[in-house]
Image: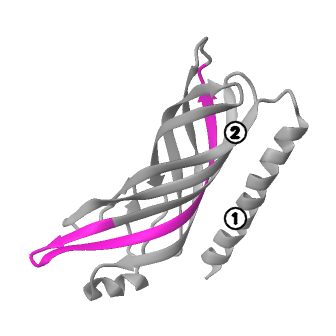
């Protein structure tokens, strides 16, 4: 219960930060900034010593709003507010069972951009991510006991690479490939985490 209260406090703090950054960037007119939406796919699985051998990755949707505060030609701060579907497929002799877990995530990403003299600006990014579980879904009654296994929060590191494609002076299309690596155990077992 103590961990859940701490996680909720972090969630509120990150949400406030997410709302303050765009306001701050409007005050500093010389700082290049922006905001937008992302839509993507997620593909998750579990890892760890206690992970069952009969699991496969599960695909889901990811949707986020983001803000970018360009701090120099090379560095930017890029917080996001993201909905992501994670989960796993359990296989056994009687068929496959899907366990899906929906999260609200707050990645606080630091982006390193590579300035070019073209409309394409490549970048790499990394940063901590906090997650709150908002829903659990199960295919079969056999998996209903899993509700007692998964925690209501998760934390990890997000990293990846991407590129901004400038389509006008006021907008860009953002394409990226990101990875999430859980650093805390998200179950009550000793050693199971998400990747």
Q: Which residue is at 81% across, 30% downward?
A: 31
| Disc 2 packing (10 Å; few <14; some 14–19; many ≥20) | some
In the drawing, does residue 17 fall left or right of residue 157? right
Q: 25 or 180: which is nearer to us?
A: 25
For the magenta stretch, what is the residue range? 88-114
Q: Are marks 2 and 1 in contact (CB under 8 Å)?
A: no
The image position of residue 103, as x and y in percent, is 52, 66
* Residue 90 circle label: none
Query: Looking at the picture, does residue 64 appear above or below residue 31?
Result: below
Query: Looking at the picture, does residue 12 appear above or below residue 137?
Result: above
Q: Residue furthest left?
A: 93
Disc tally is 2
Question: Tag 1's secondary structure?
Answer: helix
Magenta residues, dominant SS class: strand
The image position of residue 107, as x and y in percent, is 60, 51
What residue did someone put label 1 on? 10
Instruction: Please state which of the two labelled residues, at mark 2 or mark 1, is closer to the viewer.
Output: 2
Q: Can residue 68 be seen by looking at this rendering?
A: no
What residue did someone put label 2 on? 77
Q: Can residue 43 be seen by looking at this rendering?
A: yes
């Amino acid at each position: 219960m103590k961990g859940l209260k701490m996680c909720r406090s972090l969630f509120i703090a990150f949400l406030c930060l997410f709302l303050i950054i765009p306001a701050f960037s409007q005050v500093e007119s010389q700082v290049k900034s922006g905001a937008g939406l992302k839509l993507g796919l997620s593909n998750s699985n579990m890892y760890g010593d206690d992970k069952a051998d009969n699991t496969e990755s599960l695909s889901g949707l990811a949707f986020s709003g983001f803000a970018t505060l360009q701090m120099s030609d090379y560095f930017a701060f890029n917080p996001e507010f993201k909905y992501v579907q994670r989960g796993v497929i359990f296989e056994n002799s009687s068929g496959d069972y899907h366990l899906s877990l929906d999260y609200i995530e707050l990645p606080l990403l630091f982006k390193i951009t590579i300035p070019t003299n073209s409309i394409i600006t490549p970048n790499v990014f990394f940063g901590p991510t906090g997650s709150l579980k908002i829903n659990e879904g199960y295919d079969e009654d056999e998996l209903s006991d899993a509700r007692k296994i998964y925690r209501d929060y998760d934390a990890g590191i997000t990293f990846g690479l991407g590129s901004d494609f400038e389509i006008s002076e006021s907008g860009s299309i953002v394409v990226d490939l990101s990875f999430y690596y859980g650093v805390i155990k998200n179950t009550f077992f000793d050693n199971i985490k998400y990747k």
